[in-house]
Image (cartoon, rainbow, N blue to C red):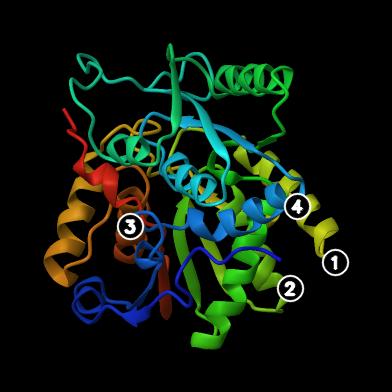
Amino acid sequence: MNPTLICKPTPLHRLDRASEKLGIDLWIKRDDLSGFAGGGNKGRKLEFLIGEALAQGADSFVTRGAFQSNYVRQAAFAAKMFGMEFHAAVMHWPYSLPGRETHPDGWKPPKADSGNMILDKLAEANIYVYEDGTFDEMDAHADALAERLRAEGRNVYQTPSGGSSPVGALGFVAACDELFEQADPFDYVLFASGSGSTQVGLVFGHRRAGCKTHLIGICTDDEPEMVDYFEQIAEGVSQLTLSNLKLSRNDFDLRQDYHGGGYQVPSAAAERAIRFLAHTEGILLDPVYTAKAFAGLMDLAEKKQIGGRVLFWHTGGLPTLLVPRE
């Protein structure tokens, strides 16, 4: 049986003032209030991932991510709760491919811990910081770390960044059932899409239920090839759920227009989105994921490309709002 980490169901409510200003019937799903280790959507995935790790008798949990990774933060606490030693390979400014480097000119490593790194220390996480490189290179560092631990006799459970495996995606398949119990299907659902399992789980859950909802993932980094990985995750979800539902890359609406220069790079549109939602509804977005996603929602609403009942799935990430952005 999988452990329970988050408070479910997370709140769902209408954004009255934002709806009036944007000209749509806008609702929000509050995974920022999930109640586990600083909030955020990763707790949904970790319920399934930790369950698998425990079933395998793991004593060590290995993953990778950016220096300020929300997933690393929540995974570190989840591992600690269940007696596993936590290790993560991280980079300050990872990027998808050579030529897509994202490190802004003049930005230096922080002089003091901030944001998620403060919480990682509280979780007693073992964090290994490597020279900036591609996500594939960061994968190789995590693989080498896992192999070293195995050579020392440890039973290692390893996940990709964001918990984006078929097992992790099950967290958002289940989240769809939670949503359907709270409200009738929406016309549109928009959310930040990064490593893939959130979007795969939401699309799979809606299609399995026969919902016609249009699901739009706002890509938060310059990586259009991610949809190919989505197809792989979806195939794994089909196998795990013993389902005949097959999803292809064409089933995933991944918008590339709002990444603002790449992963973690602050954008003017994201800053406007942060201020808009904070000033109209008192709800905080983070500059890496949710602000870029909400900036996309604002633009699509202005262009009349979305309408009817629209849901914004707030995936959390508040600690990165407290990281200096200069």
Label 3, label 2: how many angstroms apart (C-alpha)?
Answer: 26 Å
Residue pointed to by mark 4 = 55
Q: In the picture, which quadrant includes the N terminus?
A: bottom right
Kindly identify the amino acid type of the residue bearing the numbered disc 2. Arg
N-term mark: 4 or 3: 4
Asked if the residues shown at circle 4 and circle 2 are in contact, with their CB atoms under 8 angstroms apart, the answer is: no
- Residue 250 rendering spot, x and y as whole percentages: 69, 52
What x and y, as percent, mark residue 54? 69, 51
Q: Earlier in the sequence, mark 1 or mark 2?
A: 2
- Which quarter of the figure has residue 296? bottom left
Please say whether residue 14 is visible from this viewpoint. Answer: yes
Marks 4 and 3, how far apart in space?
38 Å
The residue to which callout 3 is attached is 294
Name the front one of labels 4 and 2: 4
Q: Residues within 10 Å of mark 1 (few under 14, many from 20)?
A: few
Using a 10 Å C-alpha cutoff, classify the residue at mark 4 as few (fewer than 14 neighbours), some (14 to 19) or many (20 or more): few
Give the camera-side residue of 151 and 109. 151
Residue carrying label 2: 208
Q: Is residue 160 above or below residue 213?
A: above
The amino acid sitting under disc 1 is: Ser
Spot occupied by residue 182 in the image (x, y as percentages of width and height): 49, 86
**Mark 3 residue element:** helix
Q: Residue at x 26, y 39 (%)?
A: 115
